[in-house]
Amino acid sequence: MKSISSLLLALFTMVFSSLALADHPIPSAELQAIEKKYEEAEKTNSARIVGQPNAIDAYSLRGDARLFLGDFKGSAEDYEKMIELNPALDVSHWRLGIAYYYLSRFDKAAHQFEIYHNYDNVDRENGIWRFMSQTRLKNMEVARKGLLKYEKTDRPPYPWVYSLYAGDIKPDEVYRRIDGGGFPDHYKERVLFHAQLYVGIFHELHGRDQDALKHLRAAAANKFGRASGTYMWQVARVHYDLLQAKLSNNRKK
């Protein structure tokens, strides 16, 4: 399997080309502002680390900025440094698991999500990332048999998305349940973002890259995501760009 991190050069060549910017679900000015913001955050926190080498929050902020810029290796190193400085952070550091996933270090990613379950046994989103990691590391059958167990309720749409990954419902059913949820419009957009991201990844895990791209594109364009700029929206944006780069590279072969 080709390492996800090996696609980075193609990713940034593609994303910031004039043609790609014109076709991107996020307006070009907005994309460029995102890049500038996190380049500045990386520079600011790098300078701070020089003077304060034990400043955990600086490594945290720089690790986030690096991941959002596609520097997964640098991001993982910063997150690992946080744990080196304070080992108690290890059990709750799901962000490190995400960095490992994009480095194709699926064994370490799966472990990070496993130990997070001891910290938070409600968050099914964490269980989805463990499933993703185990699918890449082994196969979907193993991942499905090893799905983490949840007894308490969770925020929508995660109970439905988790049922999707468990093989109990189909992707369209996730959206039908959202439509039937009676959510206010602004909250429904938030719920839809999470569904779009993980339905897209579900298709990708099944090798349906074009279907995956459609849902990931919707997640990147989602109004809630763009307005909030949350960590997971940045992940959705980067994941969309990685898949788009992969498909573009495949077409050139």
Image: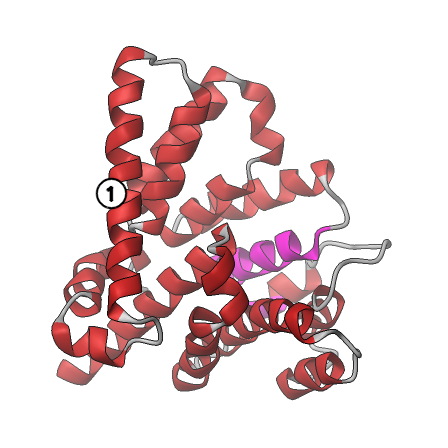
Residue sitting nearer the eye, 191 or 63: 191
Residue 133 appears left or right of 244: right
Please name the amino acid that badge 1 sits on.
Answer: Glu
Q: Is residue 135 located in the magenta-colored stretch of the structure?
A: yes
Residue sitting nearer the eye, 154 or 1: 154
Against 7, is 94 above or below?
above
Q: Give the quadrant of residue 166.
A: bottom right
Q: Secondary structure at mark 1?
A: helix
Neighbourhood count class around disc 1 (C-alpha, 10 Å): few under 14, some 14–19, many 20 upward: some
Residue 207 seen in the current view: yes
Tally the marks: 1
- Which residue occupies 50% across, 63% down? 225
Q: Give the quadrant of residue 151.
A: bottom right
Residue 249 seen in the current view: no
Q: Quadrant of the C terminus?
A: bottom left
- The residue that label 1 is drawn on is 39
- Which residue occupies 59% across, 54% down? 130
Secondary structure mostly taken by the magenta-highlighted segment of the chain: helix
Against 119, is 212 above or below?
below
Residue 70 appears left or right of 115: left
Residue 14, image x, y percentages:
18, 69
- Which residue occupies 35% across, 50% down? 68
Q: Give the quadrant of residue 88.
A: top right
Residue 88 appears left or right of 15: right
Q: Quadrant of the N terminus?
A: bottom left
Against 41, is 54 above or below?
above
Magenta region: which residues?
Answer: 123-141
Residue 123, image x, y percentages:
71, 51
Residue 227, image x, y percentages:
48, 61
Residue sitting nearer the eye, 30 or 130: 30
- Which residue occupies 68% across, 68% down? 187
